[in-house]
Amino acid sequence: MSTQQVQKKRKDDYSNYQPEISGPPEIGPEEIQTESILGDGSFGTVYKGRCRQKDVAVKVMLKQVDEKTLKDFRKEVAIMSTIFHPNIVLFLGACTSLQGKLMICTELMKGNLETLLMDPNIKLPLITRMRMAKDAALGILWLHSSNPVFIHRDLKTSNLLVDANLNVKVCDFGLSQIKQRGENLKDGQDGAKGTPLWMAPEVLQGKLFNEKADVYSFGLVLWQIYTRQELFPEFDNFYKFVAAICEKVVRPPVPADCPPALRQLIQKCWDASPENRPDFNVITSTLEGIVIDLAIPDEYGAIMWKNHFRHADYATWKDFLNVFANFIGLTSAQTQPMYDLLLNSPNLNGSTIELNFKCLKAIIAMPTRVGGQEEEVVSMEQFGKVLAWFGCLKEDGSQILDKIRQLMECAWFHGDISTAESENRLHKKPEGTFLVRFSTSESGSYTISKVSKNGVISHQRIHRPGGKFQVNNSKYLSVKDLILGEAQALGIITPCLGSRFLSLIHKSNTSGYI
């Protein structure tokens, strides 16, 4: 057999490829109960249901079963039963024995991303939405990295499902295709497959395409995730739409306030030329960087996290301590890591350096379970908040540690407590009793909570324009200076006791570093 014949045979094999089902066994129709309708997929209606005492999503094909329909059904089952990834909806099994009612069971999700984005009453901070975009990108990356390659072909926000924790998973493989790596595909006489609004230009025009068609669709997904707006509402004529997309290269307008890295990624994804579009390795890595920049607006802080913890939302306290101390110049490659120095060096026991890091730990680390064990970790968001509260890492460096300690030494500083908790602590206290806490609504700002006349508790924001702390028209270099300088004008007299930091500051020296 010649090389050309072998290549043709491979192409024919993959065009009719049906992977052997390796998932769960056949599910009997009597084991599946359908309840409320969740939506419509590319091949049938999706219901909330029950199967083997578990809540599931059930996709039911109610159409007349002909040979092509049955082939498409088996193809979707075959694809889903071979793909396992945290960001792809879990396939549980299928019912193929009842010809008039073919069914697929998958894990039950809370809803789809499109519905979530289009609801103005649901608060979704940009960092949350970018994490959701990264989830989707990871799912598609898994498909594109498989051998053979899976092309989704109907990538859109309604085919991205969301669970109760806002994790996103790719679903609906009814139109997916399998191809040999490096191979291009072309739709047959049936026409293009997918949803026209989300289709790549080459697919709309019936040209050769590959997995970069999914990249184009993902550019539109990113646009909708950022804007939370309807896609192409100005078009109601298919032929005018195709001409606009393919000939005039019309794309949705990217808002001026879009972060530059995200704007650039969106525009690269929906480039008219497939070869100019990035692959999902690049897309996922770029989204990681965007998430870090959103969590840590401080330029040097973001650089530190990207260099050492890029793929993680959290770092253990030990790892963070060592990296941070090295980054601000307290240790180097020639010295021991800071964690070991604090643990083993008698000279640091009871020192200002030790106290500074104890104060940092108190405000930045939180307990969690890692690998089944209790451990203290630092999240990228909390690191970003601490830098916003205490200074610019590039300019202040190790002085940030002194600033944290000096503020904790003040009896009136209570840190990151809520408005409700501050009112609870001030309840029935004398007029003039006050505390200072981090603002719950404005990044980098503080709030003075105080007891006013008749026991009324009021809250006043301390803004931080240009790095200086301001109340009314008075500006100070530190919160401590502001409280001392404005005490009379603000009517604050007696610090409210109960700060969790005082026992840390005034605790007698102990051996070792805890």
Image: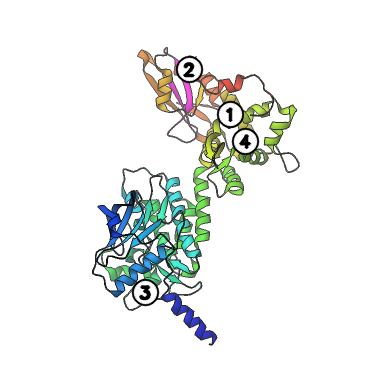
Q: Which residue has dot 2 on it?
A: 496
Circle 2: element type: loop
Residue 476 rendering spot, x and y as whole percentages = 54, 26
Among the two numbered marks 2 and 1 on one chain, the one whose residue lies closer to the N terminus: 1
* Farthest residue, direction right: 334
The circle drawn on residue 404 is 1
Task: Name the residue beneath numbered marker 3.
Answer: 205
Which amino acid lies under the numbered mark 2 shown in the image of this protein? Cys
Mark 3 / mark 2, whichever is N-terminal: 3
Residue 233 in view (yes/no): no
Few, some or many C-alpha atoms within 10 Å of disc 1 (few <14, some 14-19, many ≥20)? some
Residue 470 is one of the magenta-drawn residues: no
The amino acid at mark 4 is Asp
In contact (CB < 8 Å): disc 3 and disc 4: no
**Residue appearing at x 42%, y 24% in the figure:** 421
Spatial CA span between label 3 and label 4: 57 Å
Q: Quadrant of residue 233?
A: bottom left
Q: Disc 1 to disc 3, how far (Cα)?
A: 61 Å
- Residue 361 x, y percent position in the rendering: 58, 32
Q: Toward the viewer: 165 or 332?
A: 165
How are the colours assigned in the image?
rainbow
> Which sits in the foreground, 133 or 395?
133
Q: In the visual, does 377 lie left or right of 29?
A: right
Quarter of the image for the C terminus: give it. top right
Residue highlighted by disc 4: 396
